[in-house]
Image: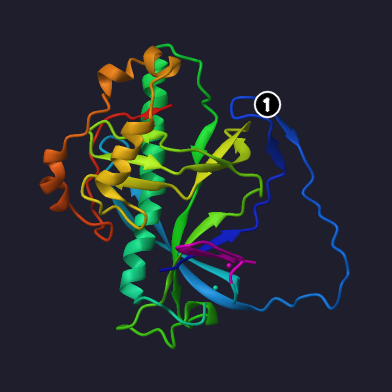
Amino acid sequence: MSYMYVREFWDVLLEATSHFGTMRLRSEFRPSALSGPAAVVNRTWIILKRLDCIVDPRTGDMQFESSEISLRGRLRNDPLSSGAMKNVYDENTAPNTLPFTVDEHLVQIQAEAMRIGLGQWFMNAFFQHARDRNVTAIDFNIAFNDAFLAEEIESPSPASGIPQITAESLGITWLVEPKRSTSVEHFSYTLVHNNQTMIFADLQGTPALVGRKDGLVLFDPMTHTVGGNSGIGDFGLEGINSFLRDHTCGDVCNRLALDEVAPLIFDTSRNEEQDNSPSPGDADSANGEGGDNVD
């Protein structure tokens, strides 16, 4: 099942020499060989309503807030890039038929936005824990990317695959993210939820400025939960056990005393509680509390 993404034109011309090292400027210019007529890209003007995922800084609870701001842009009619479960469309910010309903898509695209917001909340908690313990041997210049949802209003785009927008038939909703560098670093199982019900997995990041310093911006996170209901790619206990099998605590874990504050023992008895928790489509989904660890 493919879900729809959109990225704005925010080009980043940085390349990481190492995850914890320095960065250098690199041109992304690629000369193209003329082998025939150039491809013609078709775009459609659309009107969008912005929806922001608001994360409570104390509890991590999330809700979506509608903005009065309307956005106008040109949406590419065909995908810029495709993966196993998602398509990326260029906005300057698109399939002609839908293999899912609008409601099914909305649940999953909200889950994607919630993962990004929750990931940054956990990241902030981890950084604060590191500062409290005076541990500086970590890279603080890492952040999750800025993203928001945008619902098509008025007329649907060809990319949406929707024939019309009415009061009973809403337009498709897109996840809008900054367009990033093509240089990508991949990570595995780097955030662990300390209430022992969730881990963030399969993280990837691109070199970018974070707080006006060279850093990494993380995007497209995936989560595994005890209930297996946090969105597409959630493999539940199978994904959690894979991390528990493969992870070995190192120097940073020991300095932060993570074996004490966030032991890697997941409580499977919480499975029933997790199954009864709000789904990714619920606006006020509760997501636990406390800081998480990054290795």
Q: Quadrant of residue 268?
A: top left
Figure disc tally: 1
Residue extending furthest toward the bottom: 163
Q: Nearer the viewer, residue 270 or 249?
A: 249
x 28%, y 34%: residue: 58
x 66%, y 50%: residue: 182
On the image, the x and y values in percent for residue 195 come to 22, 33
Residue extending furthest toward the front: 245
Q: Is residue 56 visible?
A: no
Bin the neighbour count of mark 1 within 10 Å (Cα to Cα): few under 14, some 14-19, many 20 and up: few
- Three-letter code, disc 1: Thr
Name the side, left or right, on which 139 lies relative to 254. Answer: right
Report the coloring of the rendering.
rainbow
Q: Quadrant of residue 30?
A: bottom right
On the image, the x and y values in percent for residue 164 come to 42, 87
On the image, the x and y values in percent for residue 269 come to 11, 39
x 26%, y 17%: residue: 260
Q: Quadrant of the C terminus?
A: top left
Residue beneath label 1, please?
22
Q: Is residue 47 visible?
A: yes
Q: Considering only vertical position in the picture, is 71 above or below 125?
A: below
The boundaries of the magenta stretch are: 79-93
x 19%, y 54%: residue: 278
Q: Nearer the viewer, residue 143 or 152?
A: 143
Q: Quadrant of the N terminus?
A: bottom left
Q: Quadrant of residue 31?
A: bottom right
On the image, the x and y values in percent for residue 289 come to 24, 34
86 drawn magenta? yes
Q: Considering only vertical position in the picture, is 38 above or below 207?
A: below
Name the side, left or right, on which 36 lies relative to 86. Answer: right
Q: Secondary structure at mark 1?
A: loop
